[in-house]
Image (spheres, rainbow, N blue to C red):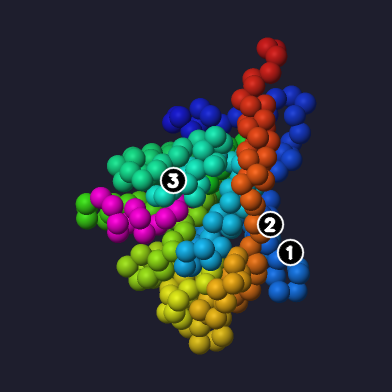
Amino acid sequence: MTANHRRTRTRRPGQPTRPTRSIYDPIHFGIDENGIPVEVTLMYRNLLCGGEPGSGKSSLLNTIIAHAALSTDARLWLLDGKIVELGLWRPVADIFVGNTITDALTRLRELQAEMDIRYRLLDAAGRRKILRTDGLDVILCVIDELAYYSVTIGSKEEQDEFRNLVRDLVARGRAAGIIVIAATQRPSADIIPTSLRDLFGFRVAFRCTTDSSSDIVLSVGWAKEGYSARNIRPEDLGVGWLLAEGGIPRRFKAAYLNDAQVRAIIAAAQMIRQNRSDPGPAA
């Protein structure tokens, strides 16, 4: 078993069978144009997020990470090319990678190996996917900024390997309890090729400078139907289009957490994780 399996916790007698917060539960993304809450269940799904700098990507990422941090059945793997965007969450992250391509590749290889082990276990059990009742931690892998690792730093070979690892994790990881959240402020065809974009069950386009950039995130043709992130006003921070599998884009405003709120959530998450790490009294 890998280190990730060793960190998986089993419930002690007397513990509730359903955690207070679970990665299997819907995650609050924000509100739509009618003030109705927008909630998304990311388990068995992946999320692609794109938009120009300051458009709202970080707000959505923080909201998702906050839910996962407070979930007793989730582990956080964070890759942050700028370090400071996700850096506040480092105290509750199991893995944190900064602006080093070699570290990013090492961790993604580890995650790929973990995924392969989980599939072998599922195959041996005659199962197709992990379930909440298995007690196996779900791994939430958040990558911000995708373009930094895939086209900016490192050699061409390293960039190619990074893209291939991400594509494999997005394509195969869902049933094994590995969720990938990828964000970029450069939604272009070289960063998000169609073969990768179409693997993401959920996509969010915040303000983009062109219709084509919006379509690169959502899918070609939505801009012509009137669903273009180019039409979002610069002052409408956090407003974007959310596309779910089989649906039509839904305009919403992402929830926002300030630094003080993030630190309060981190403190609560640390207590939750400390309690989970406590083996309890000997039998």
Task: Give neighbour class at mark 2: few <14, some 14-19, many 20+ (Cα, 10 Å).
Answer: some
Bounds of the magenta span? 141-154
Q: Quadrant of the C terminus?
A: top right
Q: Determine which quarter of the picture holds residue 270.
A: top right
Earlier-in-chain disc, 3 versus 2: 2
- The amino acid marked with disc number 2 is His
What's the residue at 63%, 73% (across, down)? Answer: 251
First-in-chain label (1 vs 2): 2
Q: Give the left or right position of residue 115, taking residue 165 as reference.
A: right
Q: CA distance from mark 3 to mark 2?
A: 25 Å
Q: Contact, CB < 8 Å: mark 1 with mark 2?
A: yes
Amino acid residing under circle 1: Pro
Name the mark on residue 37. Answer: 1
Residue at image point 51% right, 83% down:
223
- The answer to whether residue 103 is left or right of residue 38 is left
Label drawn at residue 83? 3
Residue that badge 2 annotates: 28
